Image: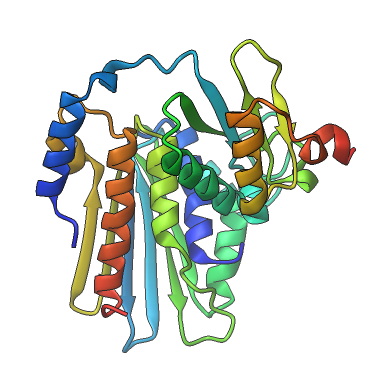
Amino acid sequence: MKSLQELEQIKQKTLDSVSLRKDRAGGIRIVVGMGTCGIAAGARPVLMSFLEEVQKRNLRDVTITQTGCIGVCRLEPMVEVTRPGEEKVTYVKMTAEKAKRVISEHIVNGKIVNEYTIGAAE
Amino acid sequence: MEDISLHLLDLAQNSISAGASLVEIFIVEDTHKGQMIVTLRDNGHGMDESQVKRVTDPFFTTRNTRRVGLGIPLFQASAEATGGQMYIKSCMGRGTEIKAVFYTTHIDCLPLGRIDDTILSLILLNPEIDFVYSHKKQDKHFLLDTRQIREVLGQVSIENPSVIEWIRKYLSDGLEEINGGV
């Protein structure tokens, strides 16, 4: 069983590391649609997959946030990715597997996964 | 919705929209009685009596963009499908409490599902909001309170990747423990 003492150690370690106060404002944003439609369509496993990949790859300049229903419920789960200085890319009908590919191709290598975008679906 | 934990993730969005700074989720499982009571309580801006009466209507929503709101009616339907019930109490300026009784032996009862993922999602996506997750099963009790976590963390952010990882493990260990160590 994890304990709060362990959390105390994490705190100490974090305080010791230099990267603590790194400004994340200029980083990459991943926005997951978490309206009723998004959640019912499977947004949570998509979110969990993004989180897992971000943690595993230690991507420190990536922020994961949420938005509500944006009105195209039939294409949920939807995810918007914004890289600094680039236009927002909207991915539709996402799955946990697709999220992994978006991380490795778009987030890490800057190459949009065209076949998952809203443009390809419409 | 495939399971109850997804309903809770959805209902919590209403609390967040209502400006809540604290969202509490209580689950009490009584396997002898075949009953699970799920409560979600927030300190958001609340609803007046006429709003409370209307929220179970799928064609009522607080949004201006569309005229349907399905979260609460779907949750109610899931509880009623098991012979259970849903109750809403709300007070303007104080908050809202939604409580549902599920009869778990009923064939139409949804599984609880990945409640740990629901709680982790809520904390990750809403780092400025405090969450309490209390889960009782027979004589076992698991409690996670982000106010407690923040107290330990001091100036370290709850969004810190190592902290999120700790919360994830804390949740899965805790659930394993109350579910009998699987």
Residue B73 position by quadrant: bottom right
Q: Please report the residue visible at 77 percent of the width from the left and 40 percent of the height from the top.
A: A116
Who is closer to the viewer here, B32 or B96?
B32
Left or right of B156: which side holds A89? Answer: right
Q: In the rendering, at what x and y percent does residue A9 appear?
A: 12, 40
Q: Is residue A54 left or right of residue B43?
A: right
Location of residue B53 with respect to B113 vertically, above or below: above
Residue at the outermost right position = A122
Residue B62 placement: quadrant:
top right
Q: Nearer the viewer, residue B32 or A75?
A: A75
* A114 lies left or right of B79: right
Residue at image position (27%, 29%) is B157
Query: Who's the residue at 72% across and 46% down the image?
Result: A76
Color encoding of the figure: rainbow
**Residue B69 visible, this angle:** yes
Image quarter in which the N terminus of chain B is found = bottom right
- Depth check: give the residue in front, A31 or B27: A31
Height in image: B166 above or below A16?
A: below
Q: Residue furthest left?
A: A5
Question: Viewed as shown, does residue B177 lie left or right of B12?
Answer: left
Q: How many numbered circles does the render carry?
A: 0
In the rendered view, tell whether residue B93 sits above or below residue B5: above
Residue A107: image location, x then y, percent: 60, 30
Q: From the top left corner, tell me how far across and down residue B139 is, in percent.
A: 18, 78
Report the front residue among A19 and B164: A19
Q: Give the residue at the far top of this rendering.
A: A85
Whether residue B97 is visible here, answered yes or no, is no
Residue A71, how many percent across, how many down?
75, 36
- In the rendered image, the residue lying farthest to the front is A109
Picture quarter with the C terminus of chain B: bottom left
